[in-house]
Image (tube, rainbow, N blue to C red):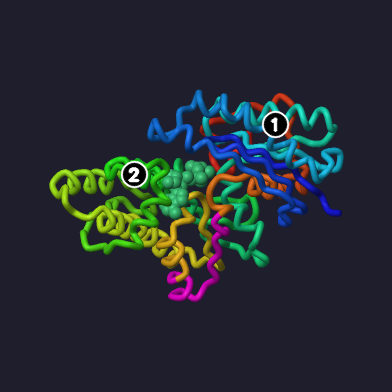
Amino acid sequence: MGKVILGIETSCDETAVSLVEDGRKVLISLLSSQVDLHRIYGGVVPEIASRRHLELIFPLLDEAFRNFPKEKIAAVAVTYGPGLVGALLVGLSVAKSLSYALNVPLIGVNHMEGHIFANFLEDAKPVFPALVLVVSGGHTDLIFMRGFGDYELLGETIDDAAGECFDKVGRVLNLPYPAGPVIDRLSKKGKPIYKFPVARLKEEGYNFSFSGLKTAVRVFREKNPDAKVEDIAASFQEALVRALVENTEKALRDYKPAKLYLAGGVAANSKLREEFLNLGKTYNIPVHFPSLQYCTDNAAMIAAAGYHRYLLGKFAPLNLNAYPSLMLGEERY
Ligand code: KG4
Ligand code: ZN
């Protein structure tokens, strides 16, 4: 038996617990989603999320330890940022208690690094340097990754994140939260016949901007109430994915990475996955993205990133705090 890391994730609206052996073999990955609870508000309500995490986490831990004795875990890895502070604190408190009670190391994991490591749960051949596009509800980051733990941020969004844009456009189109998967599904039944503008930033570099696109869809919808929602969805998705792919392609040409990775909730998007595969073919480089269940928030990715820190001996003290704005590569212990 290798080293089994317990992963705990409570940074937003998913309560998740996982046991992963040697950073790759997922023994169990459990998730209690709160999306139904937040849907009536059209987004995550932080205070409700914290309270719900507290109720959901213990049954998940009980279930995880039903088939695997907790005395055998090698360490506890927990998300300590970025995220909602109250939500993060629930996972942190539980992780600290377990680490103390079982006398095993506590490891703090950056949520965004977790998203990147979702790739290494399944990618048998990680190759570096790599170009990684991390697209989630809170982030749109283009990263040049020289190795595990070595990240250079090439570009980021200057306004809305890609997932946030999906969710806001969803509200304009009266779709349920989170709208990303719904727009993805609707797009398959529609045609991208409307040309929505994609912001091209004047400055050099690889930053993104999505607030103009969101506004363009809202104005179009107001002026064209009879346009088919499937066609609007497909046109919006086409424009957003194009913006993501254009910047990625620019960085591909400039940095010539050996591999291309996609990570985060929006990495579940079928159009984006298809376009990344096309990029791989055009530039003749391997492409990898996580399977769907590991794109959106989960704890297996936290255990995988935790295993890497475990090997480096990066153990956190029991007074580890939560950092809502923790940056990728930033170390707070
Ligand atoms: O990574 P994630 O689960 O949570 C954060 O860390 O933010 O990402 C959630 C985001 C939401 O905005 C959701 O709408 C979006 O990912 N999303 C998608 C798809 N599945 C989830 N966006 C586009 N297409 C999808 N299939
Ligand atoms: Zn996430």
For mark 1, what is the residue? 58
Q: Residue at x 69, y 45 (%)?
A: 18
Q: In the picture provided, is 259 more to the left or to the right than 76?
A: left
* Residue located at (50% from left, 76% from top): 284
The residue that mark 2 highlights is 175
User: Can see residue 10?
Assistant: yes
Residue 185 drawn at (x, y percent): 39, 57
Q: Residues within 10 Å of mark 1 (few under 14, many from 20)?
A: few
Which amino acid lies under the numbered mark 2 shown in the image of this protein? Leu
Question: In the rendered image, is residue 141 in sight?
Answer: no
Amino acid carrying label 1: it is: Phe
Q: Are marks 1 and 2 in contact (CB under 8 Å)?
A: no
Mark number for residue 130?
none
184 and 323: which one is in front?
184
Left or right: 127 as drawn, with respect to 75: left
150 sits left or right of 169 in the view: right
Q: Position of residue 306 (x, y in %)?
A: 70, 45
Q: Is residue 167 above or below residue 99?
A: below
- 255 versus 325 height, above or below: below
SS state under label 2 = loop
User: Is residue 215 located in the magenta-colored stretch of the structure?
Assistant: no
The magenta region covers 278-292
Determine whether, in the image, residue 333 is placed left or right of residue 329: right
Q: Residue furthest left?
A: 223
Mark 1 or mark 2: which comes first in sequence?
Answer: 1
Whole-angstrom CA distance, mark 1 to mark 2, is 32 Å
